[in-house]
Image: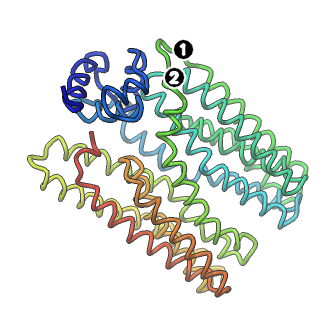
Amino acid sequence: MTEIEAVDELANRVAPMIGRAVDELQIAAVLESQGFTDQVAQERYGVKDVFALAVVVYKRLPRDVETHDDEPRTRRTFRVLSHGPLFLLPSLAYPAAYDWLGAMTMVRGLVFTTAIGWWWAMGMSLVAYRLLGHGLDRAAGRSLRLSGGVGLGVVAAGSLLIDTRLWMFCLAQMGFQVSSCVLVIHKREARLALLMVPACAGGAAHLVLDVLPVALGCGALSIALILAASWHETGRAKPDTRKPPRMSLLLRLSAPSVAYSALCAAFMLNTDARFVLADLDLGLAVAPLVLGMGAVEWRAHRYSEQALDELDSAKDVTRFRRATQRLLVRELAWCLVILACVALVVLGVLARFGLLTARGALLVDAHVLLGGVFFLGFVLMRYEGLRWPLAIMPVVISANVLVNHFAPGHEIPVFLTGCAALLVLFLLTSLATAGEVRRYR
């Protein structure tokens, strides 16, 4: 029996035990439960380990996946759209942190925590979603608690190396990021908004009445409340009925997306960190992107839903490829239009008060284009198409850094050019992979 025939025989044998396989991870867990080892995978099937064998088996199983999300589409859309404004809530407390720590100290802490929290929260959510997708709610809760706690410790320790006064601010910032990650995973966006009311109210009161202790106390109260809420949420699940997959497999599946998130953070923060304390229009240039991130996520979900509908109705591969490519371009256009509308509102307000400059307008435009890049990144991440983005982004980031080093003072045009280049390259990559049926299995 050849290796290919052996894999086909194995796929037929384990299919009844797998049922509607969600992904390769579930198959790997079943194979391990049946006593398969890396050595068996190598000797009998010619692959390097059990996970590689699961990947091969998965490709030979019939597509039979159903979605068990009974949440009404309107409610789901509203939840996703709320993510942008929700993630902007901590900024209402930044003026108080500015007055408490000083300008440069606060900026260093903000950049450090955002850079770590961006990819850390991505890793947390990916592992948890994998486990939840397999019905392992208790394991997902444990992973969120563990990874969230480790993330808090890493940021607190790292902040002490930057400035000994920073640890409380960085801990609060990271606390919001890991807690919001947990609450969003469990669809508790409304609770997150409610628990952030003290921080927002305290920040607003400080701007009007200059009550720094009150603002800091309210901010600390909100962080304590959302940490408690996320801890409670992760402990509500019933015990799992089967053993979860190995953590090494989970991390391997998450690694490309985590690396991509880290590169996105590096690219964006390399420019935006320079303007946090600059003129108001430059400091607020990222606001349309943050406010519109929920819309970016929403349009990525819509693309996935419509692409699967096309797969079910398509009569041949060529028609499916053309349909998904049209869908991709259309959803990207929607994404850019929504972000542009938000940007026009921000630009209009700044112009009304005489605060808008040409540099500020260019920086806002760059972030609109970056939103399109993030949309395409979401799509590629979902369909395991990050190989080319992971090769493209380091080149663009390196070019950005080098040009800024040798030609200082041109950061905004360089950033705008980099965003445009990423948008074009990501679009070409997405169009090339959009019609590959295997990515939608």
The three-letter code of the residue at mark 1 reads: Lys
What is the three-letter code of the residue carrying label 2?
A: Asp
Tell me what residue is drawn at x 51 percent, y 26 percent. 246
Q: Where does the image place residue 374, in percent across and percent down from the top left?
A: 46, 59
Q: Name the image quarter holding residue 398.
A: bottom right
Crowding at mark 2 (Cα within 10 Å: few <14, some 14-19, many 20+): many
Callout 2: SS: helix
**Residue 161 visible in this rendered orientation of the protein:** yes
Q: Which residue is mark 1?
A: 238
Residue 208, image x, y percentages: 82, 61
Q: Residue at x 85, y 53 (%)?
A: 161
Q: Which residue is mark 2?
A: 137
| Residue at image coords 59%, 49% | 119
Q: Quadrant of residue 209?
A: bottom right
The reply to whether callout 1 and callout 2 are in contact (CB within 8 Å) is yes
Give x and y (percent) for residue 99.
Answer: 87, 61
